[in-house]
Image (cartoon, rainbow, N blue to C red):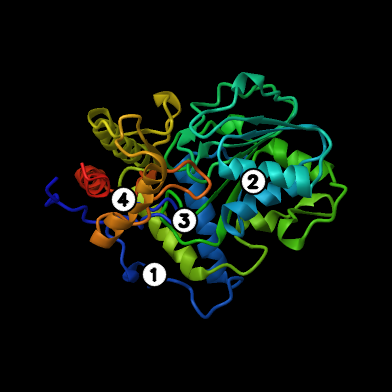
Amino acid sequence: MTQPTVRPERPFFSSGPCSKRPGWSWSCLEGAVLGRSHRSGEGKAKLKAVIDETKALLGIPDDYRVGIVPASDTGAVEMALWSLLGERGVDMLAWESFGKGWVTDVQKQLKLDDVRVLEADYGLLPDLAAVDCDRDVVFTWNGTTSGVKVPNGDWIAANRAGLTICDATSAVFAMELPWDKLDVTTWSWQKVLGGEGAHGMIVLSPRAVERLENYVPSWPLPKIFRMTKGGKLIDGIFKGETINTPSMMAVEDVLDALEWAKSIGGLKEMIARSEKNLKAVANWVEQTEWIDFLCADPATRSNTAICLKLSDACVLDGEERSGAPKKISQLLDKEGVAFDINGYRDAPAGLRLWGGATVEPADMEALMPWLDWAYGEVSGV
């Protein structure tokens, strides 16, 4: 196949850290509060602005608390698990590597006695009807390494007795989240917003705050996990008074991303851009014999972490087949056409394209002929 002539203008398709927003440059960071304490008036104002702008953009209810916490989405999830679990039994949902990681932490680190694990293979969802919402429930909204998302929150009981703890790091800002069904929601700046790493966000419903203030785990909590003091929520965490020292350069960067999101039309347009990226890939897959989605069900197919596998019609077999995605990824990286699109190390061999809002749909469309070209180079077809 002849090499395509049209290249993506921005070849950044990594699933994390993800592409910066269109038009980003170093000048976007000129307003950063550097060489100053993050506890200064100006520093705290910047941190508070991240919280306020996030809450407004996502339409988070007024009585929910939003905070900036250490260690990216991982730190935010761990904070929730260690601080909230143990009061009642818990259902753990896992259908990709990160969900399985939370299962490991709850079973082998927290060593809880009453744990039910509902699992599914890559490309599938567990039986959501089997979830007992009178227990606590821990799940990812979108499987970043499998390309499978929950279709909605209808399976979560409105009158539940337990808490829902949702890792939404590759979903928030790209998918509609039913806040009334979510008690704890976490994410990181370096996913859909294309911000920098190391910082996490946590959202608490009034029910989650009530649990924090009335339940004390039997295990010790490290300082960076503590959200209460003397039986009361530490209010400052949710006003920009962070537990540890944040990067004020990263803070400036995410403020820029939030401002960009507002400028293009807010959450509605962020979701629309992401869905256009998925549509571009879906149109190509429909016309291409050698490739298929890892997730077969369009209703649960991720529009951010778009995971692909070689189809049954692929001419490669054995080691050549399992090694082809990596070779395709390396070839397109060398050409400067697409960076970091090999599938996740724990997932089945395949390709993973980030389709979040910071990726231009035109660039996703331009990439498709290059995938065909690279497959031809690797397979000899």
Q: Residues within 10 Å of mark 2 (few under 14, many from 20)?
A: few
Kind of residue sitting beneath label 2: Gly
Pick whichever of labels 2 and 1 is earlier in the sequence. 1
Q: Which residue is mark 3?
A: 190
Tell whether label 1 touches label 3 (CB within 8 Å): no
Kind of residue sitting beneath label 1: Leu
Where residue 68 sits, quadrant-wise, is bottom right
Closer to us: mark 2 or mark 4?
A: 4
Q: Which mark is residue 121?
A: none
Residue 150 drawn at (x, y percent): 52, 29
Pick whichever of labels 2 and 4 is earlier in the sequence. 2
Q: In this view, which residue lies farthest toward the right? A: 218
Q: Quadrant of the N terminus?
A: top left
Pick whichever of labels 3 and 1 is earlier in the sequence. 1
Above or below residue 71? Residue 52 is above
Residue 246 drawn at (x, y percent): 57, 67
Front residue of 216 and 363: 363
Pick whichever of labels 4 and 1 is earlier in the sequence. 1
Picture residue at 38% right of the left edge, 55% below the top: 340
Front residue of 5 and 45: 5
The span from disc 4 to disc 1 (Cα, nearest Å) is: 35 Å
Q: Which mark is residue 101?
A: 2
Front residue of 38 and 2: 2
27 left or right of 78?
left
The span from disc 3 to disc 1 (Cα, nearest Å) is: 16 Å
Q: Which mark is residue 328?
A: 4
Q: Which residue is mark 1?
A: 29
